[in-house]
Amino acid sequence: MSDTPEMISNEPAPAAPPQPGLLDRTLDSLRARWREIAASARGVVGAAPRASLPKEDAERLKEQIEACLVGRGGEVSARARAAQLGRTYLALDPRGRRNFLMMLARDFDVDRAAVDEAMATFLAATDPVGRGHAERALRRALEPPRLRLLTQFNALPEGVKFLVDLRAELMEMARGEPLLQALEDDLKNLLRHWFDVGFLEMHRITWDSPASLLEKLIKYEAVHEISGWQDLKDRLDSDRRCFAFFHPRMPNEPLIFVEVALVQGMSDNVQALLDPSAPVCDPKSADSAIFYSISNAQVGLAGISFGNFLIKRVVDGLTNEFPNIKCFATLSPIPGFRRWLDQELRERGHALLTPPEAERLAEALAERGSDGADSGGDDGAEGPPVLAAALALPGWHQDEDLQKRMRGPLTRLCTQYLTTARASDRRSERPGAAPARALDPVAHFHLSNGARMERLNWLGDTSPKGLRQSCGMMINYRYKLAEIDANHEAYRGEGKINASSSIRSSAKASA
């Protein structure tokens, strides 16, 4: 199934970092819980290293790590040393943390000489028993010692959360640094095993949930900002649902959560959907469940996919609770459209519009005395593209005449982007490789999970973010239970996009 993608509406998205107050309380709690555990190791650890972890301090810390790995003093001492190591890391400044991780990546990597020796033994083995022993020895040699150290944190209170947050920091540091990239990959694979979907628990979050959990929803919402407690209460009302995945070792931390509106008909406007003055509907009368936001609450779990499983679990649960609901769909942004459109405008300019479209827009701009009213003439080289000039006008979407003239070309171009634009991936060029994925990350996520493109919604999100990302447009992806598996296979195997007749008609017009 699909990897966890970038920030979007209905796919797991990297959460914004928690606000300082929440983060400080988390760190204080972690340090306090590990203090008692680490106390028995102080005689071994010695003086605390300086915040920047200079070379001489790093050498002493390296000895402590080696003691953890060999298990001197038994399991209790090893656990205490791990707790002290964690406290030491949390006390370091950014430079010190980088030095710590570089030491871990450099000095506790695979012993290549041991790997060569194990490989030679494996190749020389002739009988099945000897070959089996050699294979297991080779596996052990290929496991870097740092993995054993990281695994020790699993036994500490909130140790798994510590590793998730550690990876979030490591992801930033690892860019352009091969040693740290290898360490980050090791940690990602470790977390992937620990966060297998079979270990996760889905729970509904309500207004009666603990205040600390509700606070985290506000902080972690990555798609449609929650403006305060009343806004959150509205999103948890009787005609709304919020579900989250939790891990047993992180019971108070949502991993990913989905917000659902129970409505009549397929929603086409997020401002209307979230309007606090709208009446509360009877959920038993709803015929549609609209997924309008999915947020990944843990940056350190990016690339570990379980958002698709959450959607399917929620669909199953809502089907049992509300048999009248027959339509399961999203109301999704199109986050990459404006970026793609700007590139197309730079490369193709006036040629991006048909002559009638360019003429109508030029007339509208001329009436307003705007620069860029020239449609380009016969050679298409004069003045800025009229579409770019129109989009640059503040409040263009509130000008009824102007936005009507822009609707046709923007809808056509957006459909073209969704159905034909593909992400460049060298792997897709290899013989037998899967087809290139859809360029838009939201589209890729939902198509991978078996949805179909249902309807493009003009000015479905007129917030500053919606206008900036997708010229205000949104799209419904529909999950028809009987078609999910076939749609998934067609997209992943052949690159085929399943779309409604209205989307297909618009795509033909843009061809």
Image: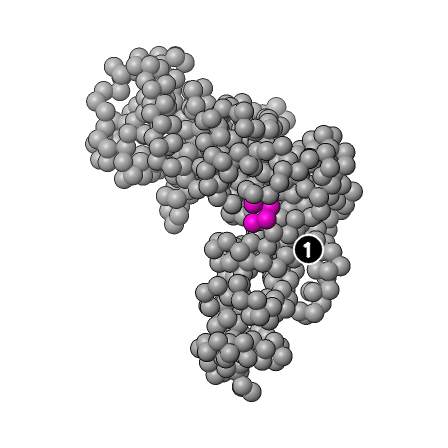
Quadrant of the rendering where the N terminus is positioned: top right
Q: Residue at x 45, y 26 (%)?
A: 212
Asked whether residue 97 appears in the rendered view, the answer is yes
Q: Main secondary structure of the magenta part?
A: helix
Q: Which residues are magenta?
A: 271-275
Residue type, numbered disc 1: Arg
Task: Give the left or right position of residue 356, taking residue 325 as reference.
Answer: left
Eyeballing the image, is 395 above or below 256? below
Look at the image and say whether residue 207 sits in the magenta stretch: no
Is 23 drawn above or below residue 176 in the view shown? above
Question: x, y percentage for residue 197?
Answer: 60, 31
Residue 400 or residue 500, whichever sits in front:
400
Determine which quarter of the picture holds residue 362.
bottom right
Q: Looking at the image, which is closer to me, 67 or 374?
A: 374
Q: Between residues 80 and 510, which one lies in front from this camera angle?
A: 510
Task: State the residue at coordinates (63%, 68%).
Answer: 408
User: In the depicted view, which residue is nearer to us: 12 or 292?
Assistant: 292
User: Dot 1 surroundings within 10 Å: few (below 14), some, or many (20 or more)?
Assistant: some
Q: Residue at x 61, y 80 (%)?
A: 355
Tell me how the rendering is colored.
one colour
Residue 149 at x, y percent in the picture: 41, 26
Q: Which residue appears farthest toward the bottom when viewing the image?
A: 378
User: Which quadrant of the figure contains the C terminus?
Assistant: bottom right
